[in-house]
Image (spheres, rainbow, N blue to C red):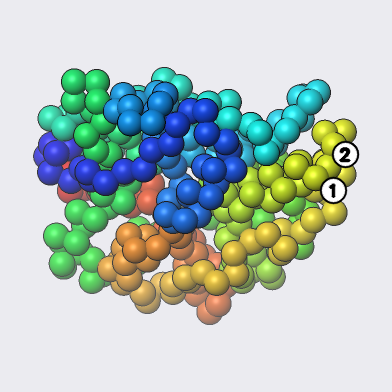
Amino acid sequence: MKVKKVMNTRYSIIEKDARIKEALARMARENINKLIVVKHKGDKKPYGIITEYDIFYRLSRTKIKKFEPYNTSVASAATTPVETANKEMDLKFVAKNFLTKGYSSMPIVENDEIIGVITKEDIISLLYRYEDLINQPVTLLTTQIKGKIRLFDKLSLALSKFMGTGFSNLVVIDDGVPVGILKVYDVAKTLFTIRKINPTPHWESVVKEIYVAEVMRKDINILTNESSIKEALNIIITTNQHIIPITDNNKAVGLISRSNIIRYMINNKLI
């Protein structure tokens, strides 16, 4: 299957000289976690890409003598150059790139200009074609929870986990029960506020006084072993929740993520 069969012609861009605060606001407003970066307004040539993780990484760096997050540019946090795809590319090749390189989307270009984007959600949505499959229990796609943190751990520990794993989401656990999700976006937004108010030498001490419970998202979707794959697809495709805790007798036993769904699709030759 070719990329053009599932590519999305709707995408969001931001200029490289825009401020990080504008990128955070745009992500929240449009319920997305990445923006294609261009050099100038009206430019169609991709300069780079900025994700919520890029912003988190930039804000969590400590070896900066003078740091003013309010005036920090998108270009200072963006990943450049950005890897692109073309509409005639094999979809399986792009899907494998997502898994091996940690991408969640790729701009589609033609004659060096952006014509669309391909995302993990675009690929995952192909599962709706397999009605027999998506009505099966979600356990068929469930994997072990590798990224988790406790409810009353300090936010500083979360910073270390995000930096050490590259994950963008952590499942928040309390006595074995999933009670929320800590998104790297929410941590980045918190760091932005802290670093704007506090001088560089002191911001880390402020972070050490904040608990995960104060920053995490509590209103999340949780499924059980009896839930269907279709229920998981509906959550991932229609919301900005990229991982779903799976429970048995209220205890966390695994999760569904975009990456493990795509891996399943590749292994079973569904793309």
* Residues at marks 1 and 2, CA–CA distance in whole angstroms: 7 Å
Q: Quadrant of residue 56?
A: top right
Residue highlighted by disc 1 = 206
Q: Residue 107: x and y, percent?
A: 30, 33
Q: Which mark is residue 53?
A: none
The kind of residue on which mark 1 rests is Val
Q: Quadrant of residue 86?
A: top left
Q: Is residue 150 visible?
A: no
Q: Is residue 88 left or right of residue 137?
A: left
Q: Residue 97: x and y, percent?
A: 33, 31
Q: Residue at x 69, y 70 (%)?
A: 175
Q: Quadrant of the N terminus?
A: top left
Q: Which mark is residue 202?
A: 2
Q: Residues within 10 Å of mark 2 (few under 14, many from 20)?
A: few
* Residues at discs 1 and 2 in contact (Cβ within 8 Å): yes
Q: Quadrant of residue 229?
A: bottom left
